[in-house]
Amino acid sequence: MVKSVAREPVPARRADAERNIAAILDAGMRLLGADPAASVADVAKAAGVGRVTLYGHFPSREALVDAVLDHAIGIADLALGGVDIDEQPAPEAVAALLRSSWQVLDRHRRLFLAADRVLPMERIREHHDVPLRRIERLIARGRDDGDFRTDLPLSWLVTTFFGVLHSAAQEVESGRLEQADVERVLVTTMLSLLCP
Amino acid sequence: MVKSVAREPVPARRADAERNIAAILDAGMRLLGADPAASVADVAKAAGVGRVTLYGHFPSREALVDAVLDHAIGIADLALGGVDIDEQPAPEAVAALLRSSWQVLDRHRRLFLAADRVLPMERIREHHDVPLRRIERLIARGRDDGDFRTDLPLSWLVTTFFGVLHSAAQEVESGRLEQADVERVLVTTMLSLLCP
């Protein structure tokens, strides 16, 4: 490769790159959230960058979806941090966390479906590491308090929390579950499973 | 395209095609079941057909994985048909069906992971239509008998059965769940959820 002589100082170019990446992630979240089949070209156009620039940061559609999912989960996790789960009994806290998690997931439902098309479930789960650790702490506390069962592995109960939430997204998208019924179904399911 | 004059009767060519497809599906089940990243070329070689022949029947890796999954589920469903679920109380029948479904899924675990990499979860679920209808009938019977809860939608309980089984496959693959503990975890989880 031919190295070009830098025409502007490095920090300025780095600031440009950061601005482009932020615009691409925001546009990706918006477009993929509206249509899981949105193309890389659509996202580049909405972000106001060229396709070459986009591919420079995200070499494939899969890499783009991966980064957009991570971005959306990071923002969602900041919002979920506002749910006070330490001040109430664990069962009430699980119900509150399920309801707020569902509202977040529902808003980003199509983005999750876009991710489900190109990323393995294990990778999608990895992106949820931070919110899953919050759920794990809460379920562990409920076990210590005697509210939750201890005959199933803690990691399995956390996986089930993650699983029922994402199943609900697919059930709503496929029309098998009424939007109005989701919060009741999620809370009933999870508490039936957690309480001995 | 230039039409060539048929040199052998149509039924013979059709029989060749069927033989090739059967060999491709069997090789696909074997290879993808051992390594979810197995390539189309590997499958063609193991099936004893050329890549052009394989692509003639399955135009992409995704189409191949899709067909192999369908083939495996068809065979598995025939095996599951041998579990007598009508002669025992519904909770015992659910436990028996979970155990045998797990044994089948565990044997095809890597094939399921290969499918999870290229097919959306909704598509994987569609392939399970026949076994899912069996589970639906069983849960409906348990509700009629007064053994299972009726405050959650039947379709949601069926989805949960499907979801916990596939979560278990991922938990085992990732090392978060011990192989020896799976059947107990699955049965305890599902019966906690189904019984009021």
Image (spheres, coloured by chain):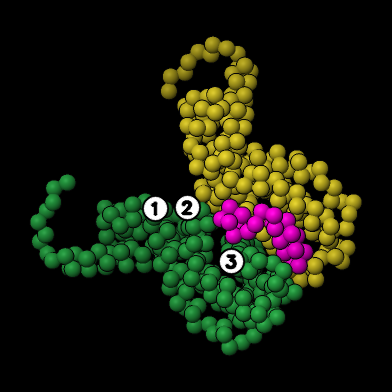
Chain colours: A yellow, B green
Mark 2 = which residue?
B118
The label shown at residue B61 is 1
The magenta span reads A170-194
Mark 3 = which residue?
B162
What chain letter is assigned to the residue under label 3? B
What chain letter is assigned to the residue under label 2? B
Image location (x, y in percent) of residue B196: 75, 74
Where is A76 relative to A9, above or below? below
Q: Amino acid at mark 3?
A: Phe
Give the Cα separation between the discs numbered 1 and 3. Answer: 25 Å
Where is B132 relative to B145, above or below? above
The chief SS type of the magenta part is helix
Q: Do the residues indicated by labels 1 and 3 lie within the same chain of the protein? A: yes
Q: Amino acid at mark 2?
A: Val
Left or right of A157? Residue B7 is left
C-beta proximity under 8 Å, tags 1 and 2:
yes
Counting residues from the start of the chain, the first of labels 1 and 2 encountered is: 1
